[in-house]
Image (cartoon, grey):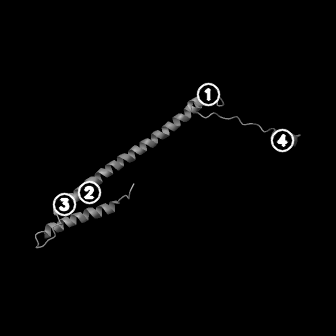
């Protein structure tokens, strides 16, 4: 995405277009007035700028609301799947390979270290 214009930049440009249009209207009858200075064209430019800004603001607000709704639904889906995982593990057992058929991670049994257990027994005894 390119640079986002601030409201201050927008306001400054809209005011410049308005002042330019007013100046052209006031002085266009003067002898030798530059032909490129067209009041109607500048007023149309300002109107188009305002219309595009309003459309952008509407779309931006709609996009922001859509993103919030998306995030809320994403969180809901994660929470529901977490509960589904627990239900699958509760039904099949958390070490059963069948839980993988549901996309649920199979828990791994912790292996007891014989050397550590033997050392603990010797330390007690």
Looking at the rendered structure, the secondary structure element under dot 4 is helix
Picture disc at residue 120: 4
Gap between marks 2 and 3 measured at Cα: 12 Å
Vertical side of 111 occupied by 64: above or below: below
As drawn, the label of residue 121 is: none
Precedes in sequence: disc 1 or disc 4: 1
Disc 1 on helix, strand or loop?
A: helix
Could you tell me residue 47's position as x and y percent?
A: 22, 56
CA distance for labels 4 and 3? 90 Å
Task: Specify the quadrant of the image occupied by residue 111.
Answer: top right
Q: Residue at point 43% right, 42% down?
A: 70
In the displayed structure, would residue 92 be above or below residue 60?
A: above
* Residue indicated by mark 2: 49
| Distance (Cα) linking label 1 and label 3 | 71 Å
Q: Please tell me the numbered disc located at residue 41.
A: 3
**Dot 2: few (<14), some (14–19), or many (≥20) neighbours within 10 Å?**
some
x, y percent for residue 61: 35, 48
- Which mark lies nearer to you, 2 or 4? 2
In the displayed structure image, the side of residue 61 where residue 88 appears, left or right: right
Comparing labels 4 and 3, the label whose residue is closer to the camera: 3
Label whose residue precedes the other's in the sequence (2 or 3): 3
Number of other residues with Cα within 10 Å of mark 4, as a class: few under 14, some 14 to 19, many 20 or more:
few
Residue where numbered disc 1 is placed:
98
């Amino acid at each position: 995405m390119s640079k986002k214009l601030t409201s201050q930049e927008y306001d400054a440009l809209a005011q410049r277009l308005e002042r330019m249009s007013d100046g052209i209207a006031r002085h266009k009858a003067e002898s030798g007035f530059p032909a490129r200075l067209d009041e109607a064209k500048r007023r149309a430019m300002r109107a188009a700028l305002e219309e595009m800004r309003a459309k952008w603001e509407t779309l931006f607000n709609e996009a922001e609301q859509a993103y919030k709704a998306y995030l809320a639904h994403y969180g809901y889906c994660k929470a529901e799947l977490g509960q589904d995982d627990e239900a699958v593990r509760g039904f099949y057992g958390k070490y059963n390979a069948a839980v993988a058929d549901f996309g649920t991670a199979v828990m791994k049994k912790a292996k007891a270290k014989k050397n550590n257990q033997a050392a603990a027994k010797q330390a007690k005894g």
